[in-house]
Image (cartoon, grey):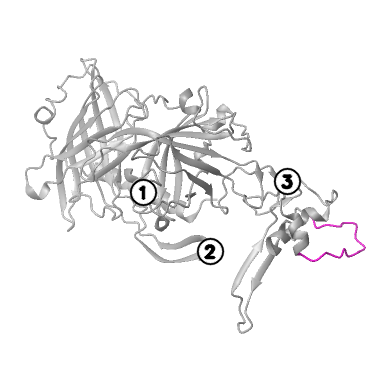
Amino acid sequence: MISMNSHLTITITMFFFLLTLLTISSFSSSQSQPSYKDHCSSIIPYSPLKDTTIIIHSLFPLGGYFTGGEKIIHDQNSFNNYSSFLLRHTKMQETINSDLFRIESTVSFRTNPNTVYYRVRNFTYGDKPSYRSQRHFKTSFVTFRLEGFWSKSSGKVCMVGTGVGYSKTGDSLNLEAVFKLNNVFNSSNITSLISGSLESLSSEKNQYFETISVIMSPKANYSYSLDSKEAENEFPFEKKGLSLNLHSSSFCSFPLSRAIRRLQLEYTHECSSSKNCTPVISDELPYMMSLKVSECSNENKHRLKVMMVFSNKSDYWVEKGFNPKTMLIGEGWWDEKKNSLCVVACHFIGMTKSSLNEARIGDCSVRLSLRFPSVWSIKNTNNIVGQIWSNKSANDPNYFKMITFRNFENDRVGYRATKYEYSQLEKVEKSCPAHKILKNKGTTRFPDVDSYDMRFDMSARDRESHWGIAFGFSNPLSVGDQVYEIDQYNNLPVSSFTAESPMPMKEFMMLEQELCV
């Protein structure tokens, strides 16, 4: 089932793509390209083509993030984030110089269309905040058609070209620019980061725009390097995690990170502020963390390249853009012996609001361990639990106290415990009155566990009100020691138990325990 938000996102993406094509076709034929030799020959010399064969190459990622260019890219969001750009239609051709390749590309810059600009109101459900937000999809964009050269040995790219955009007053702008990139190589690892800039070449004042600074995470021949024996020994041994049946052919088609969203962070009692308590730069303690996958490997062992994204309470439903202050980049692997996902994460360094040219990856001192509990209890019914910590000493300025996390209990993640352990039944028996077993003519003593008879609704109201002041419902969590599963599509139980194999009344007290304790 596809949600309304998914439909809206797909529609916006398709609209942006079609608009980009229309923009490309609207380039005026009379608008000549700027001179490559005048603006790029000092970086990469011009070289004639060897032949006309176009090389299909995965060298360039599809896009990245940028800052600047406010004159031609309006409505950049107020959350102090970086917006995204797309690098499309890249063509590559060999030249007579074996080190140089001619490239053509279309580059489109836009503000994030999924930005939530304001909240309508908020309310609470138990101890979990909820927000009803008004989403305002307002996108500003500009597209450039560029051509130039890439040097394989130096990793530099230089292209010149023209673009079309609009001023804040709606006037059409004919733009000229030079696009420069650094660190574009045939191979990459966790420390690799492509950075560069798009600079205006327009001589007329009203066509000139501020420099746009960009960064991209490389795609070409990624090599994992952080899962060393030394790093592996830093992770705890977990016995009560699910032993996942991960086949090489299916791991990357459904990577673990698809199930790892909106993890609730929990701090020690010493943490009342963000000082020494969080690995990212934040005015307050982050409330949530998500893992987003960018690379996946089945070779030798199951490995992922991930982005750790931290968010505050006010961002509960907000899809925010790229913000290196609240993100870490790292590598993870599934350790079958420890039944856990291990991640080594690094910081973004050298980035400022005005420029990304000095951006780099460094300080890989953050560790994350995540597991899917195989056993649930009354005190823990989370599908995901884990820890985040620093391997630095306590007197290091970048050290932070250990953080634990768990998923929100109402979030489905695709992995469930296989067993339930009772620990409060004796207390329940003392707290609740004894049940008198009623005799009946039927042959079935207990309700069918595969039916809605195992669920009941609840409501509460005061004497002066005709309407209820609180409502709720209860579903079984376990039957015996077996976790009670619900079909996520039909909301029907899929437990393997049947009425023909009844269980002792004591094992059905899970619901009573919730109400009486």
Q: Earlier in the sequence, mark 2 or mark 3?
A: 2
Return the residue at label 1.
Answer: 275
The CA span between labels 2 and 3 is 28 Å
Q: Is residue 388 left or right of residue 137?
A: right
Q: How many marks?
A: 3
Q: Magenta residues: mostly which secondary structure?
A: loop
SS at badge 2: strand
Mark 1 neighbour density, 10 Å: few (under 14) some (14–19) many (20 or more): some
Mark 3 neighbour density, 10 Å: few (under 14) some (14–19) many (20 or more): some
Q: Amino acid at mark 2?
A: Tyr
Work out which residue is located at the far front of the displayed protein and give it.
395
Q: Quadrant of the C terminus?
A: bottom right
Picture quarter containing residue 67? top left
**Residue 482: which disc?**
3
The CA span between labels 2 and 1 is 29 Å
Q: Earlier in the sequence, mark 3 or mark 1?
A: 1
- Indicate whether residue 259 is drawn in magenta: no
Q: Answer whether labels 2 and 1 touch (C-beta < 8 Å).
A: no
Which residue range is magenta in the image? 432-448
Residue at (42% x, 57% y) in the render: 313
SS at badge 3: strand
Q: Amino acid at mark 1?
A: Lys
The CA span between labels 3 and 1 is 43 Å
x and y, in percent, of residue 429 in the image: 78, 60
Residue at (63% x, 66% y) in the render: 472
Picture quarter containing residue 418? top right
